Image (spheres, helix red, strand yellow):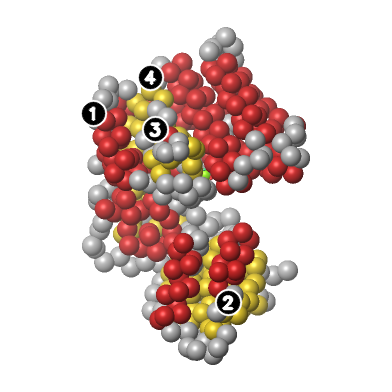
């Protein structure tokens, strides 16, 4: 039986040495109860996005640079890992994946989101094919499992929602037939049935994949392996002097992830909470360091303030045209349309006549929302904003971050402080 899900993100498999490090970690683990969920190597998903844009701008004609970078990057890693065995069959498998990726990139006649999911999924297929073969070669026996056979979703491309019953049915069978080998599968990628097509769970969605498998398998734990020693109270790339949070509740972690703490994909925690499965965030650079642990603790934990910045926000203000109140009827109307369009409010504020909503920038969706609302409401918006959130706010602590910036909205509760602002030009 699989008891533990280990998720390795792009940074943990970004080059040949990183893959060797992964092998070293696994050598010391009880592998017959582990399933690895692996992301695309390094920045491959971004690179495929770029290749896709190039092909579409070029009507599907060969746009060599972005694609050849992807090919060269994987070939370098493969040549390095298999330098003593260049006849290994993985070379042919990977070459076929390159070819399929190329064919998919040419199909620019389709809807963008559909084509996006079909092409970006090659990142995870390449990484897992390569890593599985390498580990087998090194004596770390494993079985490569195609996540698209188990993570079944709706057709909401680029942010697909799991069909839990179908996932559970298939994952149950997988676990029942477990033969004691370590499993390796892809994060992020999924598929929908009728019609059968590739889908993805949204950027950084591999954490969510790990949580779906864990939930359906009733696993004992999920570990996310990171280049940091756990969860921190702010992004060390942006803030000086960050502190590690050793232990936190699901509740607290969901709040942090929702506001944009990028270390965990926001959808990851609910499936774990529902089965009381602890989540560990652990360093792949130094396995001796204690992980941060997120679980169902009821202990009182005195949390330190956490700072979270969500970039590329749209702030839309929606005002009634006939000066009727922004009452429950109007709000329900607006939120129902947002729900249909899959637009998620990161923050809202309501006055007598105006509803202000902050959401992730997406021009297509913004235009659809505007069109759907403009009969009844006047719409104004600003793009390129930041949503800055402080959990466990202390008076004045925001000062350094917000100084010299233009503030659009401020909201404050006992535990949370949020500001929508324009970053310095
Ligand atoms: N490879 C995907 C991405 O970069 C999924 C992930 O890394 O979690 O968004
Ligand atoms: Mg990633």
Under circle 4, the secondary element is loop
The reply to whether callout 1 and callout 4 are in contact (CB within 8 Å) is no
Who comes first in sequence, dot 2 or dot 4? 4
Q: Earlier in the sequence, mark 3 or mark 2?
A: 3
Residue at 46% across, 24% down: 132
Q: Secondary structure at mark 1?
A: helix
Residue 114: x percent and y percent?
A: 56, 43
Q: Which residue is mark 4?
A: 141
Q: Nearer the viewer, mark 3 or mark 2?
A: 2
Crowd tier of the residue under label 1, counting other residues whose Cα lies within 10 Å: few below 14, some 14–19, many 20 or above: few
Residue placed under numbered mark 3 in the picture = 149
Q: Nearer the viewer, residue 192 or 19?
A: 192
Determine whether, in the image, residue 145 is placed left or right of residue 359: left
In front of the other: 26 or 334: 334
- Residue picked out by circle 1: 176
Depicted 405 relative to depicted 228: above or below: below
Q: Position of residue 15 (x, y in %)?
A: 58, 31
Front disc: 2 or 1: 2
């Amino acid at each position: 039986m699989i008891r533990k899900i280990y998720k390795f993100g792009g940074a943990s498999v970004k080059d040949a040495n990183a893959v060797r490090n992964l092998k070293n970690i696994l050598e010391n683990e009880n592998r017959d109860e582990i399933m690895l969920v692996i992301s695309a190597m390094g920045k491959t998903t971004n690179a495929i996005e770029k290749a896709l844009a190039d092909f579409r701008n070029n009507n599907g004609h060969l746009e060599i640079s972005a694609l050849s970078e992807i090919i060269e990057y994987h070939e370098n890693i493969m040549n390095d890992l298999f330098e003593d065995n260049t006849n290994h069959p993985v070379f042919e498998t990977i070459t076929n994946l390159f070819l399929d990726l190329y064919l998919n990139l040419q199909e620019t006649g389709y809807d963008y989101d559909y084509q996006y999911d079909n092409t970006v999924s090659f990142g995870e297929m390449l990484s897992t094919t390569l890593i599985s073969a390498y580990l087998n070669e090194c004596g770390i026996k494993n079985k490569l499992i195609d996540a698209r056979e188990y993570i079944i979703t709706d057709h909401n491309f680029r942010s697909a929602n799991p069909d839990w019953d179908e996932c559970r049915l298939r994952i149950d069978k997988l676990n029942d037939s477990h033969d004691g080998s370590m499993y390796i599968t892809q994060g992020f990628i999924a598929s929908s049935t009728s019609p059968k097509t590739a889908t993805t769970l949204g950027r950084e969605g591999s954490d969510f994949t790990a949580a779906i498998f864990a939930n359906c398998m009733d696993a004992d734990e999920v570990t996310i392996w990171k280049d940091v020693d756990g969860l921190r109270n702010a992004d060390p790339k942006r803030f000086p002097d960050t502190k590690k949070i050793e232990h936190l509740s699901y509740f607290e972690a969901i709040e942090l992830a929702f506001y944009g703490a990028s270390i965990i994909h926001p959808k990851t925690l609910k499936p774990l909470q529902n089965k009381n499965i602890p989540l560990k965030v652990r360093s792949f650079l130094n396995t001796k360091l204690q992980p941060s642990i997120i679980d169902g603790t009821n202990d009182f934990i005195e949390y330190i303030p956490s700072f979270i910045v969500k970039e590329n926000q749209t702030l839309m203000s929606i005002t009634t045209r006939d000066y009727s109140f922004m009452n429950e009827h109007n709000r329900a109307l607006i939120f129902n349309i947002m729900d249909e369009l899959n637009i998620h409010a990161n923050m809202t504020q309501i006055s007598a006549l105006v509803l202000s909503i902050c959401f992730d920038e997406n021009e297509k969706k913004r235009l659809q929302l505007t069109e759907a609302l403009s009969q009844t409401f006047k719409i104004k918006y600003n793009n390129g904003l930041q949503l800055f959130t402080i959990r466990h706010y202390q008076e004045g602590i925001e000062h350094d971050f917000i100084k010299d910036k233009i503030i659009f909205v401020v909201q404050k509760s006992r535990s949370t402080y949020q500001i929508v602002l324009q970053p310095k030009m």
